[in-house]
Amino acid sequence: APAQGYRLAGHRWPTRTIRYHNATAYKDAVRAGVQAWNASGAKVRFRETTRGKAALQIRYSGSGCGGSGSVGRRVHYRPTVFFGRGCESSFMPLIATHELGHILGLSHEDRRCATMSSAVGLRCPRAPRYMWRCRLLEADDVRGAIRIYGGTVKPLNPVRFCPLFAVPDPPVNVTLAYVNGSVDATLTLPEPRRLIPDYASPPFPELHYYRYPNACPAGAATGPLQRRSPDAYGTQTLSIDGFLPPGAWCYAIALAGSDRSTSPFVTATVLVP
Ligand SMILES: [Zn+2]
């Protein structure tokens, strides 16, 4: 019935184990898709094997990013999933899961949030910036596979989005100087560690800092927050403040992360003559 969602097509696999060989470099993404389906509760499993023993081949098609796979088992052709070579890795687990869904016999489902939608994430909540959709299957996808192969729906991963980058490390080698009525900070900003290996573009660096007379207080930073957005990571000198009355001034400085997290604060002091 249409209200149930999912669409089926093609032939179901006669076996409950589908042996595949993956000749592409998208090893982690395909394994993530395989794991998602294998843990879904549907009574069907993908298992990696050698090229010669595989009933399903996973290969490259052309450049660009995309995937294709026949819907359901093809009787007269060798079932194959094709991937473009140019896919960003945060996108690939979803694409792999989607194409494996076609192999199981699921067609496109565009009426609700489903991994089997014709465009990735069509009716799903959008991933916040610098997050990716790490829940690879939605309830509708699993119900479709169970309709074909039997089984019971296992609870979905409660986490829908995962960060692309780790919480940043604090700036290092911070020194301050008061030059011509301006506080200049020379510091090194470490690039945030990628949690998805080859995701290309890190968030722009953003410094968060607080200024205190004399010394920085212990514990949490308070007072008016100041921000600077340098153009790059690495070692650089930035103007972080303007004219100050004479005396010692302490700055507590952190590097902001992509998901509102910040690194621990480091402190540095400048003497204004
Ligand atoms: Zn598709």
Image: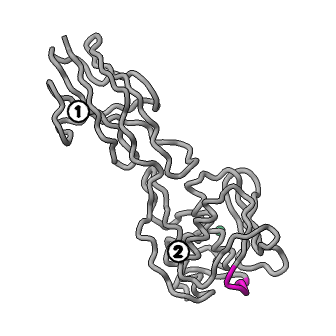
Q: Considering only vertical position in the picture, is 218 above or below 109?
A: above
Residue pointed to by mark 1: 210
Is the Cβ of the residue at disc 2 closer than 8 Å to that at disc 1?
Answer: no
Front-most of residues 38 and 6: 38
Q: Amino acid at mark 2?
A: Arg
Tell me which residue sits at (41%, 70%) in the image: 158
Q: Position of residue 262 (x, y in %)?
A: 33, 43
188 left or right of 148 in image: left
- Give the residues drawn in magenta, as a range: 11-17
Using the image, determine if residue 201 lies above or below residue 95: above
**Ligand 1, what quadrant?**
bottom right
Residue at 45% x, 50% y: name it: 130
The residue under label 2 is: 111
Q: Is residue 165 above or below residue 180?
A: below
Task: Please say whether residue 116 is one of the residues in the magenta stretch.
Answer: no
First reached walking from the N terminus: tag 2 or tag 1: 2
